[in-house]
């Protein structure tokens, strides 16, 4: 669970704690298919995936990797403060990949509705290949 953070604790250029997950296994892809209802065989059937050009078999759902990014964000910033979260899917994630999520604070501003920080996030695999880029905004309280 995320610790309480205050607007004064965060500065532009700060990095969020890194999260490393994996290696991701096909079993996780199948479990995610069941949870999401997305049973595209590209994510669950190695033979089908190879037949359509995925040399290493089934690939992860992009939303599974997005969930890992979300886990990294909410492990740092209490979820109740996160106001916006969006990503762009950049690359496919293969079986046995280890995903590392990093992020850097790019903006900090006081607004009439609260104190906002903006952080760019990225998920890469063990070879440094980018899988997701994204951004989130959080409204943090002042230290009293």
Image: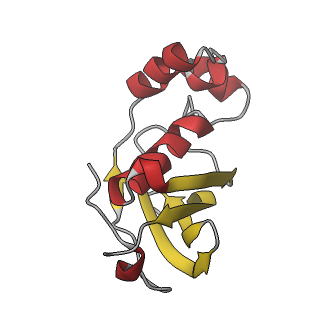
Residue 1 on image: x %, y %: 26, 48
**Residue plotted at (59% across, 37% down):** 63
**Residue plotted at (40% across, 54% down):** 72
The reply, left or right, for residue 103 in relation to residue 48 is left
Which quadrant does the C terminus fall into?
bottom left
On screen, 94 above or below 72? above
**Residue plotted at (60% across, 53% down):** 85
Q: Nearer the viewer, residue 122 or 72?
A: 72
Q: How is the image coloured?
A: secondary structure
Residue 42 appears anywhere in the view = yes
On screen, 5 above or below 126? below
Residue 125 on image: x %, y %: 47, 56
Q: How many marks?
A: 0
Q: Nearer the viewer, residue 111 or 59?
A: 111
On screen, 4 above or below 111? above
The reply, left or right, for residue 11 in relation to residue 88 is left
Q: Nearer the viewer, residue 90 or 66?
A: 66
Q: Nearer the viewer, residue 87 or 21?
A: 87
Residue 119 on image: x %, y %: 54, 70
Res 96 quadrant in image: top left
Residue 98 appears anywhere in the view = no
User: Please, which residue is most extreme toward the right here?
Assistant: 52
Residue 59 on image: x %, y %: 57, 34
């Amino acid at each position: 669970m995320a610790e309480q953070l205050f607007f004064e604790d965060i500065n532009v250029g700060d990095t969020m704690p890194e999260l490393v997950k994996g290696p991701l296994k096909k079993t996780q892809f199948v479990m995610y298919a069941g949870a999401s209802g997305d049973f595209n065989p590209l994510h669950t059937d190695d033979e089908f995936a190879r037949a359509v050009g995925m040399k290493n078999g089934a690939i992860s759902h992009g939303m599974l990797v997005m969930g890992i990014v979300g886990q990294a964000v909410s492990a740092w910033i209490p979820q109740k403060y996160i106001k916006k979260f969006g990503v762009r899917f950049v690359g496919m994630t293969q079986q046995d990949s280890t995903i590392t999520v990093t992020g850097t604070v790019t903006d900090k501003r006081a607004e009439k509705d609260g104190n906002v920080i903006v952080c760019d996030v990225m998920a890469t695999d063990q070879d440094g290949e980018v899988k997701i880029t994204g951004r989130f905004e959080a409204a943090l309280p002042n230290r009293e």
